[in-house]
Image: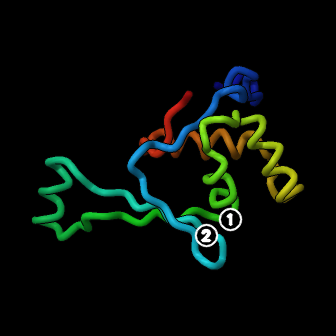
Amino acid sequence: MKKNNVISQNYLEKIPVRTEGIEWSKDENGVITLEIVNKGVFNFIAQKLFKRPKISYIHLDEMGSFVWPHLDGDKDILEIGKLVEAEFGEKANPLYERLAMFFRILESYKFIGWK
């Protein structure tokens, strides 16, 4: 995806989509919290033996909380980046590198897919 520290145009044209079934909420401060149900055999064992929770709550940071509602299956990363830049200005830089890392993390946990 990166070549000589440059993100490819093809990656920026990808359209992220939230995974179905992930509940989320926004608090009075605008912080988005994802509610992830821990299911499957290994999670069941961990819940019983190690008292792991049935639901994990993932709190997104300020920028992640801004981006999450825009993952509607219509906007590509380039469009989302323009919205982030308009909202956060210089604070968002390096903009597309940060967005790319954010989306890689979301994808690695299966919180998003691609359209």
- Between residue 18 and residue 51, name the one nearer to us: 18
Coordinates of residue 85 in the picture (x, y in percent): 84, 50
Relative image position of residue 71 (x, y in whole percent): 61, 44
Under tag 1, what secondary structure?
Answer: helix
Q: Residue at x 61, y 53 (%)?
A: 68
Amino acid type, mark 2: Val
CA separation in Å, label 1 and label 2: 7 Å
Q: Nearer the viewer, residue 105 or 64?
A: 64
| Colour setup of the view | rainbow
Circle 1 residue:
62
Q: Residues within 10 Å of mark 2 (few under 14, many from 20)?
A: some
Q: Secondary structure at mark 2?
A: loop
Q: Residue furthest bottom?
A: 28
Q: Quadrant of residue 101?
A: top right
The residue identified by callout 2 is 31
44 on left or right of 101? left
Looking at the picture, which amino acid does disc 1 mark?
Answer: Glu
Q: Nearer the viewer, residue 84 or 42?
A: 84
Residue occupying the point 63% across, 79% down = 28
Q: Position of residue 96 (x, y in %)?
A: 75, 40
Considering only vertical position in the picture, is 35 above or below 40?
A: below
Q: Residue 53: image x %, image y %?
A: 26, 67
65 vs 17, left or right, is right
Q: Which mark is residue 81?
A: none
